[in-house]
Each structure stands twice: as C-alpha cells, then as structure tokens.
Amino acid sequence: MWQWFHKLGSPRWFYQISGKFLPWLAVACVVLIATGVVWGLAFAPQDARQGNSFRIIYIHVPASFLALAGYYVMAAAGAVGMIWKMKLADMVMVAAAPLGAALTFIALFTGAVWGKPTWGTYWIWDARITSMLVLLFLYIGIIALSRSFSTRETSARACAILALVGTVNIPIIYKSVDWWYTLHQPATIKLSGAPSMHPDMFKPLLVMILGFYCFYALVLLLNTRTEILLRERRTTWVKELAEGK
Amino acid sequence: MFQFENFDAFIAMGGHGPYVWGAYGISLAVMAWLALAPLRRQRALLVDLRTQLLRTQQQAQRRRGESQ
Amino acid sequence: MSSQPLLEFQALTFERDDWPLFSDLSGAIKAGEILQITGPNGCGKSTLLHILATIEPLNIGTLRWLGEDIAKCRQQYLADVAFIGHQAGLKSALSPRENLQWLSKLHPLSRCTSAAALARIGLAGFEDVPCYTLSAGQLRRAALATLCMTQARLWLLDEPLTALDVQGIADLEALLLAHVENGGAVVLSSHQPLANPAVRTLALDAMAEAAL
Amino acid sequence: MTTLSGAFFGVIHRDLSIAMRHRGDLLNPLFFFLIVVTLVPLGISPEPARLAAMAPGMIWISALLATLLALDNLFQADFADGSLVQMMLSPQPLWLLVLAKIIAHWLVSGLPVVLFAPLLGLMLSLPQAGFLPLLLGLVLGTAVFSLIGAVGAALTVALHKGSVLLSLVVMPLYVPVLIFGSSAVQRAVDGMSYGGVLAILAAVSAFTLLVAPFAAAGALKVGING
C-alpha cells in the first residue's frame, strides 16, 4: 500500500502512466460530450414553460457541478501535499485552480444567458448564482496568491492553506447566501428542477454530466503533466524526453 | 426523435436561438481552449528544453575543439 | 564536557525551485566550538542558518539536537537556541529596555537584568530612549545584548559583525569567548576572520561549486 | 523560564504600547470609515427614508473595508524588523502568540470601529431599534474579520504589494458575516426578532476563534519564506 502511494507520488511515474490512458480519456470525453450536445440540442423535448432556452441546462448544470467539486478536489490535493509532503499533490492542486475557475465562469455565463429569455434580465441575484460568484472569487484569490510567490513549493503550501480555509467556509457561505435570498425574495423561480424532470430530458443531462467528469479529469491530467514538466525540467528524464521528441 | 420541423427552426430555437447557441458556443470554445492550452504549453516547453540542451552540447564540443 | 555534539546536521540539501544552493552538507557543532560559515554573497549562508534555526523548512537531510531528531524535540531545541538575524528583532517605537523585557517573555533571557546587559554591551545611558533614535551600530549592540542575558547553549548569528565598530567587534568577541568557555557553542556567518582560537570554518562556496 | 501566560500577555502588552505611541495611525481607519459613510448620501440621496433603508448594509460594508485597511499592518511591521522571527523561535506555541497579536490588533482597529458605528448610524438616519443589534453584531463581526484576516495577512506577509492581494484573498470569506450582521440590523429595524441571527453570528465567531489561530500560525510558517 505504502509503496504504491510513494510510487504514485513520483511525478515521473505519474507522467508515464497518465500518458497511457490519456488518449482513451480524450476519446470518451469527446464522444460523451458530442452525444450529449446533439441529444440535448436536437432530440430532447423542449420545456413546456421555458421553451428551447431550457436546453442551456445541459451545459449549466454539469459545469456548476464540477465547479464546486473542483474546489474540493483542489483542497484535498492541497491537504495531501501538505500532510505527506507529496510533490505530485501540490502539482495537482496548482493544476486544478484555473480549471475550476474556468468552469465556474462557464456556469455563471450560461446562467446569465439563460436568465435573459427566462426572467427578462441577464443578471439576477439568485442564491445559486450569487454563491457561484463567491466561488469564482475564491478561485481568483487562490490563483492570484499562487502567482505572487517566487518559489513553487512555498506557493503550493500557501495555496493549500487558503484552499483549506475556503473549504471550511464554503458550506457557511452557501447556507448564508441561501438564507439571505429567502429573506429578500421568496423563491418563485427555481433554476433547475432536476428531480422532477421528464426522463427524456434527464437522460441527455446524465450523458453530459458524465462527459464533463471525463473532461475535468482530462484537463486536470493535462495541466498536471505540464506542471510536472515545468518543475522537473532539470531532471534527466525530462531532458531525455525533450531530446527524444 | 428530432424535435424541430426543419433546419431553420432548429437554428431559430423558437426565438431563443441566440441565447442557446451563444451559451453552447462560448462554453465549448472555453472548454476547447482549456484542453488545448496545456498541450501547447507542453510542446513549447519541450522545444525550449531541446534548444537549450543542443546549445550546451555545442558549447561543450567547441570547448573540446579549442583545447585540442 | 561530553563528546556528544550539541547539533548535528546530515546530508542537508537545499534547492530553490530545483536550483541547488548547497547539497549533501554535513557537520556537527560540539560544546565549546565556534563554527564560522564563510562564502560569497548568495551562496546560502543565511539560508543555512535559517535551516539550523528551523525557520526555513528542511527539505532533504536531518537535524539532530543532542542526538535526537529535531522534528521530535523542537520545543526543547528552541528553548536552548538564540538566533539573531539580519533584522535585529527590535521595535523602533520601544526603548532597548522595553524590547529586551518583551523578548525575555518569549525566550529564556534571565542570566542578568536588561540594564546590566545593556551596560555590558556599551549602551549604558541609552536604556530608555526609543530605538529609532539609535544608530545602526547601536541597534546591533542592543540586539546583541540578548546574548548577555540568554541561557541558550547554542547561538546562531547571521552576520553579527555588520555595522559594529572596532570596540563593538572586540566586545562581541569577548562575549563569544566567554560563551564557549562556559560550554556553549556558536554558529555564525561572516566575511571577516575572527580573532578567536576556537573558530572552525565551513566554506560554502566550495560546496556551491561542487553542487553545480 | 518563559511561561505561557507571560508570553501571551507580553505580546498583547507590547503591541498595545506600540499602538499607543503611534496614536495618529489608530485614527486613520476611523476617518476612512467616516469618509466612506459620508460619500453615501452624496452619491445616492440625502433623503432620510432612503438613507435609513441603506444604513445597515452601508455601515457594515464600510466597517468591513475599514478593518481590511488595518489588516496589512498585522504581521508586516514585525516581519520587516525581525521580531516576527523571534516570536516564531520562541519555545511557546506560535498559535498562542498569533492569537495575542490578533486580540491586540482587534482592540486597536476593530473596537474603535464598533464604538464609532452608532455615530454613523445617526448620520445615516438608522432607526432607533437598529442600534443595539448593530453594536452587538459589529463586536462579533469585526472579531471574525480580524481572525480570518490574520490568515490572509500571514500568507501575504513577505510579498511586496501584498495589500491588494490580501483583500482579494480575504473578502470572499467575509460574505457570511456581512450577510448575518447586516440582516440582524435590518430585522430589528423591521420589528422582527434578531436574537437568532446574532446567535448564528456568535457561533460563526466562536468557530473561527477555534480554527483561525492555528491556520494563521501555519500560514506564517509558510508565508515568511515567500
């Protein structure tokens, strides 16, 4: 078990093994997302109330899902890196931050575009949108912090601490924003009614969520591999890799 | 089953076309960029490394040539 | 005096962004010894002292205090170490006496009173003026006054001679000598040679070249 | 030998006496607080009814900004003159010394803001019922601002131009306190009970008090090597 753990912690081993299943992941990701997009855009029935604008849900919900999950992935990687001094975990954490921020942006953007035909306005201070915005700020804080340290080790340690503090805070932030929203305006419009959705609408959503998970894993791997090359560029194996190309 | 009567209706999306296509277009573009950016960076990094290695090798050779 | 070293360091390697400052550095400091770290600017003298003082985290290598791993006995170790860095650690708004009184709440500084320490280091009459009125050399003396008061066995001094005049250097050397004769030990970084028979030197520049 | 309580009160005593010698600096965040609140009627409307509607939120936001302004100085000065390193090398636990610093910092930056707030309530025609929850909420809230802020200040202590970064890092974490704090005042103004909201705020501050000193101590160990 421990041997396996240390092996996984070796950036070189990780780079080689991840290179092997990267193409499969890419294929799965493209197939799932393409299926989901075509199914969602053309073949899923339109919503009785919202019409075709409802089709944005197939991007919005998976992106929101992974935006939040991504923060926990980042914090978990940071914790592992801090506790076991595992270099690879630090790299995963650094790789997860911009990816999570981009997904949060997608969730916010699709939410706003969806809002225009539904509520007649691009921006509404809905509880979920507001929480998403705060999440984006948390990501931006981490990215800004990670860029201002001169050494990568210190930067990773600092970001891990901030990510952990943020993780403790996220449930409080979500609860407080929820409560704030019910205080100011009763919830008349629910953005997604996933549980009460018609199965024909729900199936493509499931495909898209799976596709987004694959996409997240794929980009996280790619970012981590870049980070590995960057950090290990003075080692012999990276030099051999550069010459072999 | 295809939900629209013809291709034009599919593009128009019952009047919601710009919103739906805009949301899908921008999102997918961002996602494509997310996937391609690290690949491009990796390639640039490896090319950089290789030229650096070649330069140090050449320097070493030249030094050896001078000393002989 | 036992022959067991106070502080041992084994196979210390320090990299800044995968760039080695020094690697595989080993050594030991026994009671009654002064170890002077020499080397050009940027070779890692301060970093080594910071690692020995546990300010900078240890990446590769081990540190032992009285034969025990420092990770396990950091508290006891810190109680037996006095560190003075580039910055003196004095608040400019407070007087030297107030500064020393505050520091003695944090560190075991009870060998003598702050007034006696300040008198011994040549700052008599300046006990109660704010530190911002003191010169650079006087500030350094005020910081070194903690050495008169401390009960710590190991002193870690980063460039202690900076800004001191001839008399100040002589005073410091007397302090160091008295300390090692009492069974203490000193690690210091400096460019200038010290007029002390107990000094051993550790040249970091050779290390740095070997590492590259 | 050094003692736990000696070190703890030593740090508080030192920080307070330094603050007393720079009394002018103490007033700066207060004037900032006052000026921001003065800008509200100038920028929106001097009409008492409209001001009263905005007062709870505006006072809370300006209090947040005022404490944020003072945060920079929490560890930076000690880092620059080397006394922070002396604290970290004390055999006493670092989190305790950090807590002492936070308490001293709150006494000189958070507490004045709390005491100043009723005056600004008057200026923004806050209804009578709002004053007590404003005071109570600000006592708890500014404490959380100082505690969470300490983590951010510790992380950015060695960075040049750390202050903008510090705000960026810390402000999203202030969201719950702002929500609970200002809505307690709002509820009191609207004639509803506000005890429950203040209780939640108290729970948040108690939790932060338990966690933040350890996080800030860990952050300092990382931050000084920036």
Image: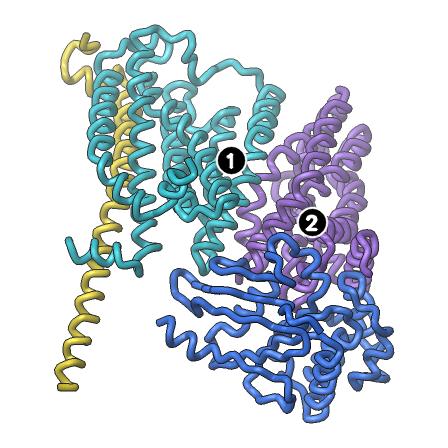
Chain colours: A cyan, B yellow, C blue, D purple
Residue A54 seen in render: yes
As drawn, the residue found furthest toward the bottom would be C166
Three-letter residue code for mark 2: Trp
Q: Nearer the viewer, residue A195 or A240?
A: A240
Say which mark, if any, is on residue D95: 2
> Which secondary structure, mark 2?
helix
Which is more foreground, mark 1 or mark 2? Answer: 2
Residue at coordinates 32% horizontally, 54% vertically from top-left? A230
Left or right placement of residue D28 versus residue A179 in this view: right
| Quarter of the image that includes the C terminus of chain C | bottom left
For the point 57% across and 49% down, the residue is D167
Quarter residue D27 falls in: bottom right
Could you say which is closer to the camera, residue A108 or residue A39? A39
Q: Residues within 10 Å of mark 1 (few under 14, many from 20)?
A: many
Q: Which residue is mark 1?
A: A134
Residue occupying image coordinates x 47% and y 15%: A190
On the image, the x and y values in percent for residue B6 come to 14, 13
Tell me the amino acid under the disc marked 1: Val
Q: What is the chain identity of the residue bearing mark 2?
A: D
* Residue at position x 84%, y 83% in the image: C119
Q: Is residue D129 above or below residue A245?
A: above
Rendered image: mark on residue A17: none
- Foreground residue among D26 and C160: C160
Work out how far the residue at label 1 is from the one at label 2, CA to CA, in angstroms. Answer: 29 Å
Q: Left of A212 or right of it: where is D209?
A: right
- Is residue D42 shown to the viewer in this render? no
Q: Quadrant of residue C3?
A: bottom right
Residue C200 position in % (x across, y down): 57, 82
Q: Are marks 1 and 2 on the same chain?
A: no
Tag 1, which secondary structure? helix
